[in-house]
Image (cartoon, rainbow, N blue to C red):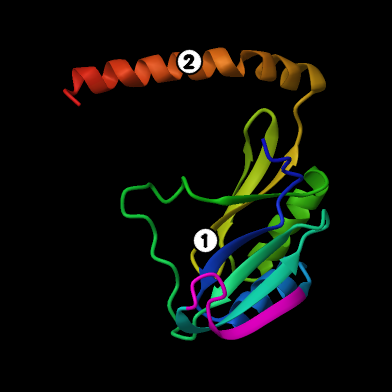
Amino acid sequence: MVPIHGLHHFAWRCRDAEETRHFYEDILGLPLVHLVQADNVPSTGEYCPYVHIFFRLRDGSHLAFFDLGDDTIAAPSPNTPGWVNHLALQVDDEAALKDAKARLEAAGIDVIGVVDHHFIRSIYFHDTNGIRLELTTHVGSPEYMSSKKAAARGELDRWTARKATRRQADGA
């Protein structure tokens, strides 16, 4: 296996680079640290003028966006509920989570939560591109996390069997 050390960046299309910069830098506090502007895509050679912007998280990873100059956001997946595809970002603690919620709401952003998932507590909201974001903080005890790790493979096997049974019943 290739040794994967961590996330370098997650990239997504945005409607407008400045609008996206304002949201991620001014509201969420992630610094804009790099910008690439080009007319041709390096990996394909395709002509497509773009700007690629990078915001650094505290762990050194980045969120990145492509502005293709046409004021269009990425279309949501038509076969997936809107709550499924999202990006979860970790904050220090519950106080930081509540502070973030207050800051987002003060900026006019609709926020769901704080939601208790037993091992994390989270808030949910959308950025200016319609991307669902989650801010979360870890609250699970080491014992709880250890028990979940020990049970995860068996739980997945039971889900896989349940899914297969359901698909057979549906004639798939």
**Residue 162 vertical position relative to residue 65 in the rendered view, above or below:** above
Q: Is residue 131 left or right of residue 118?
A: left
Where residue 37 appears, as percent x and y from the top left, is 63, 85
Disc 1 residue type (three-letter): Ile
Label 2 to label 1: alpha-carbon separation = 31 Å
Viewer-nearest residue: 102 or 136: 136
Where residue 104 appears, as percent x and y from the top left, is 67, 64
Q: Secondary structure at mark 2?
A: helix
Q: Main secondary structure of the magenta part?
A: strand
Label 2 or label 1, whichever comes before in sequence order: 1
Q: Which residue carries the number 1 mark?
A: 131
Where residue 121 appears, as percent x and y from the top left, is 68, 39
The quadrant of the picture occupied by the C terminus is top left
Mark 2 vs mark 1, foreground winner is 2
Q: Is residue 81 left or right of residue 154?
A: left
**Residue at screen point 59% across, 85% down:** 38
Q: Are marks 2 and 1 in contact (CB under 8 Å)?
A: no
Q: Which residue carries the number 2 mark?
A: 157
Q: Which residues are magenta?
A: 33-45
Q: Residue furthest left?
A: 171
Viewer-nearest residue: 125 or 5: 5
Q: Secondary structure at mark 1?
A: loop
